[in-house]
């Protein structure tokens, strides 16, 4: 599981876990040594309790936690095993098997925990990358829609320009004919001042509209 705690809180929890693990190991070891006169089966059963701090250390601190805690327990309990070896040599095989299992389980639990953490980190990384890709595709889609809108707007303006140019051309043709007709009429009525004035005004308007 990924750790998202603040650094100060994470350090406090780490210290608490180390103290708790060490305290449990010390208590179990003290029970072993203060009751050494009990028969071997009692110590074999009590030795199963060492699995708890080892497994927790492995789950909390990974392979290093499992290996270190199991090695510390081995060193602490080794003198007691030497004592019982002289008392009951046949029972020592069970003790050595238990010690071996504690070390194997410590390493295996830490290894599996580390693999689970790596898988979780990879999963979170994949989710982050996927989210970034989705956001990127979304932005690209929005940009594409904006560009398409601008292209459509440009096409509409171009079509409007063509239509305006065509309309202006269609207007200029009749204006040209009208201007020529007015000029001819002005020449014919040159002796009529009123008609000449009207013709001059009409010619000026035709020229203005033809610009």
Image (cartoon, rainbow, N blue to C red):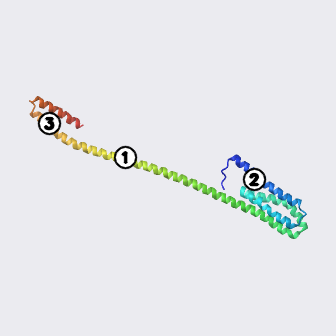
- Measured from the top left, where is residue 53 in percent x and y? 77, 58
Residue sitting at x 13%, y 38% = 181
Q: Nearer the viewer, mark 2 or mark 3?
A: 2
Disc 3 designates what residue? 182
Disc 2 designates what residue? 17
Q: Is residue 43 above or below residue 8?
A: below
> Are the two marked residues, 2 and 3, in contact with CB atoms closer than 8 angstroms?
no
CA distance for labels 2 and 3: 108 Å
Position of the C terminus, as image quadrant, is top left
Q: Is residue 36 above or below residue 162?
A: below
- Measured from the top left, where is residue 24 in percent x and y? 80, 56
- Measured from the top left, where is residue 198 in percent x and y? 15, 32
Q: Residues within 10 Å of mark 2 (few under 14, many from 20)?
A: some
Q: Secondary structure at mark 2?
A: helix
122 or 54, which lies in front? 54
Q: Secondary structure at mark 1?
A: helix
Q: Earlier in the sequence, mark 2 or mark 1?
A: 2
Q: Earlier in the sequence, mark 2 or mark 3?
A: 2
Question: Where is residue 188, by image quadrant?
Answer: top left
Q: Is residue 178 left or right of residue 40?
A: left
Q: Nearer the viewer, mark 2 or mark 1?
A: 2
Q: Secondary structure at mark 3?
A: helix
Disc 1 designates what residue? 153
Q: Residues within 10 Å of mark 3 (few under 14, many from 20)?
A: many
């Amino acid at each position: 599981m990924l750790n998202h705690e603040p650094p100060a809180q994470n350090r406090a929890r780490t210290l608490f876990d180390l103290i708790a693990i060490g305290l449990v190991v010390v208590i179990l070891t003290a029970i072993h040594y203060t009751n050494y006169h009990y028969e071997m089966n009692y110590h074999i059963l009590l030795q199963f309790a060492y699995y708890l701090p080892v497994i927790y250390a492995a789950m909390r601190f990974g392979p290093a936690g499992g290996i270190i805690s199991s090695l510390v327990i081995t060193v602490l309990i080794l003198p007691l095993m030497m004592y019982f070896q002289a008392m009951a040599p046949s029972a020592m095989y069970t003790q050595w098997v238990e010690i071996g299992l504690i070390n194997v389980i410590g390493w295996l639990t830490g290894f599996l925990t580390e693999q689970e953490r790596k898988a979780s980190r990879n999963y979170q990384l994949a989710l982050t990358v996927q989210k970034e890709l989705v956001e990127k595709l979304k932005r690209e889609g929005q940009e594409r829609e904006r560009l398409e809108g601008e292209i459509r707007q440009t096409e509409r303006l171009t079509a409007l320009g063509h239509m305006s140019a065509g309309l202006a051309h269609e207007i200029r043709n009749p204006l040209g004919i009208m201007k020529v007709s007015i000029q001819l009429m002005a020449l014919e009525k040159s002796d009529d001042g009123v008609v000449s004035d009207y013709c001059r005004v009409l010619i000026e308007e035709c020229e203005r509209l033809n610009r």
